[in-house]
Structures are given as C-alpha cells and as structure tokens.
Amino acid sequence: NHAGKPIRCKAAIARKPGEPLVIEEVIVAPPKTGEVRIKIICTSLCHSDLTFWKLKDPPAIFPVILGHEALGVVESVGEGVHEVVEGDTVIPIFLPDCGECTDCLSEKSNLCTKFPFSVSHWMDREETSRFTDINGETLYHFLSVSSFSEYTVVDIVHLTKIDPTIPPNRACLLSCGISTGVGAAWKTAKVEAGTTVAIFGLGAIGLAVAEGSRLCGAKRIIGVDVNQDKCEIGKKFGVTDFVNPGNCEDKTVSQVIMEMTGGGADYCFECVGMNSLVQEAYASCRKGWGKVVVLGVDHPNAMLTFNSFEVLYSGKSIMGSFFGGLKPKSDIRILEKRYKDEELRLDEFVTHEVEFKDINKAFELMIEGKSLRCVIWM
Ligand code: CXF
Ligand code: ZN
C-alpha cells in the first residue's frame, strides 16, 4: 500500500520533439486535494499525442509524459475526493467536468467554467507537477492525463467511472477519439434519421462520426479520403458512398457531393484538421439548413476565412465540436450502455495492440497511416 507515499514506476518520456519516447523510472507523487492517483491498465494513441510530440513550439513543452486516452484503476485518492474509491475502474478525460458551474449544469455545454480547458503542463488546481525523473528533474503533464506511465495523477474533474466488466482495450477508446467522433454526430450536429452526412477524412475520428451517424439513423454516409483503401475500411463503419478527391477529374469534391446529393449533404464533418477542407465541407452542405462541424485540429494559429455574403445568404451553420459536445461524467455512461447493448461498435477500431515497451511502434503505425487505434498494454 503506497497511499500517501511516492511511487517509483516506469513511464515513457518524450524528451525532445519528434524523438522516440524513452522508458525510464519516474517518481509519481501522491495525489493532493481533489486528485486521484491511478494505475494505468492500458492506453491508446490518439492523434493529438502525435501532434504535440512533433510540435517544436509552445504550447508543446518537454520533457513531457504524453498520452490521454486510457483506462485505469484508482490506487489512492487525495483529500476531498468522494466520487471514487481505491479499486474503482475509471477513464481519464482531457475535458474537465466539475458538475457545479453554469456550463456543467447546462445541457447545452460541455465547456467547464470552473476548470477552463487549456493546454496546461501542470495539475489543474495549482501549477505543479506530480512527476519527477530519478535525477529530480520535473516532467510535465499532458492534457491533465499523462497516461504513458504505469501510474499517473489526475484531478477528479477529469475522471469518469466505468463498468469494470467491459474489456479495458474497448473501454479506453471512450476516453477520447471515438467518443469525440460519435458525439459530434449525436450531440453537436444532432444528426436526424433519414439524412445525408459527408465526412472529410476517414481516420479514427471520421469513422467514429460514421458510426455515430449510423446510430442516429442517417441514410447516406459519404466518406471523403485521398487514401483509396479507406473505401473498403469505411464500409465496415457504415460509410455508404466514397469520394476520392484524386479521382474527381476536373471537379472539386464539393461539386461531386452537390451532384450526388442533389443540393448538398445535411451535415458535413471536417476530421482532418486542414482549413481548405473546412471550406470544401462548407461548400458541400445544403443551403438553408446544412451544418458544418469542425473536429480536425489545424495548426494552433490557423485562421478560417469565409465570404460574409455567402455566410449570410446560405443559411448554413459552422459549429465547433470539442470532445464531440459530450459531457464527460454523464454522456460516457450512455455510450458505455450502447456498447454493452451491442449497438455502438468499438471492437473494429482496435487495429493493433502492443506492450508498453514497444510504445514507439504505436507512433510508427499511426504515422504510416496503418492504424486506427493501437492499444498499449502496461
Ligand atoms: C485535443 C483537441 C485539440 C486540443 C488538445 C486536445 N483533443 C483530444 O485529442
Ligand atoms: Zn485525443
């Protein structure tokens, strides 16, 4: 029993941008007020880990313990924590949910005001780290989670209890990417039955949008991707039509989608993080009621440009979707139930699994575009 004492364990440290992670011994301090120390069972690689690993400028910082999509078991709790107890199975979520502020109490928002989201390198309640390496050097936190460690400390506002009977390598997917995609269709766009959806980018997020759209009863799900292999892969996730921008000859993707749908898709989702694609998505959706949902992450300083007249007379909406508009503590439970009821599919997203010592393999697979989700077992 280590409660109240530091734990020495292994963590994968990103010491320099773009360089392979190194597994080292680290010291994980006990949880302070409002915090929970958890033993990570498994974690999976999300594209945001890759984005921040490669980034040479702020908000990236090194040395850092990356990782934020995971499943763990509570090892010990800090003062004032009553929501979880030792032994509970939990998933960390980068988006806080305090349950008390105006936003957390509102059905319309998932952006906590008491703990506003930021790309911080510290714990949530004070600017300190719970990690040091064996030389006493401070290691930074990532997205309030840092799951590439056998033990991590997470604020209670970032934890959601989960049914311990669900396989860990499935439940951990609900921690970020898949929930984000499914939520974007369900909660942000509120996709209606019988409608047409267009998804730009069929990575894990795009395919999760397809899964969410299918659950909402969408009739037609058009996938757009430059990788022709995604045509077959998409079918497994309910994609009914496929457009490869490379095969559109003299037409733009939006022209092709306009023709296919006779006036545009009801909902368009940008899941790549490329500004030109947001424009293309905007041009692909139905005037009057079309919704464009922005999910992809472009460079932090990238700007979107739209013609004001067009925005005015098109009647289209452009919406941002952070964590798919999901409220971490209440909506994940609903997705969990739909998985148990065999409605929501998660299994198909796990294309690879590796041991913790081979964590760099997970990075390689994602860079090569070979994996959707690679689960890393601790
Ligand atoms: C990301 C979205 C972009 C900012 C950092 C967090 N979400 C999850 O991967
Ligand atoms: Zn993520």
Image: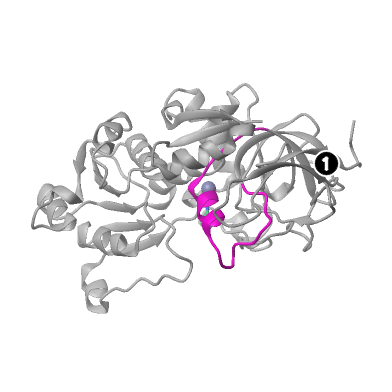
Task: Tell me if 80 is positioned left or right of 284 in this view.
Answer: right
| Residue 270 spot, x, y in % from top left | 34, 54
Q: Residue at x 51, y 24 (%)?
A: 340
Give whichever of 42, 289 is nearer the camera.
Answer: 42
Disc 1 element:
strand
Residue 265 versus residue 304 in the image, above or below? above
Instruction: Give the amino acid type for the residue marked by disc 1 in the picture.
Output: Val
Residue 357 magenta-drawn? no
How many marks are shown on the rendered structure?
1
Q: Which residues, given as a range, are shown in magenta?
A: 41-66
Q: Residue at x 36, y 39 (%)?
A: 207
The image quadrant of residue 230 is top left
Q: Residues within 10 Å of mark 1 (few under 14, many from 20)?
A: many
Residue 58 magenta-drawn? yes
| Residue 140 spot, x, y in % from top left | 71, 56
| Residue 194 spot, x, y in % from top left | 24, 40
Q: Residue at x 42, y 36 (%)?
A: 371
Residue 192 versus residue 264 in the image, above or below? above
Task: Tell me if 372 is positioned left or right of 41 in this view.
Answer: left
Residue 175 versus residue 108 in the image, above or below? above
Q: Mark 1 = which residue?
A: 77
Q: Residue at x 51, y 44 (%)?
A: 46
| Residue 5 spot, x, y in % from top left | 91, 41
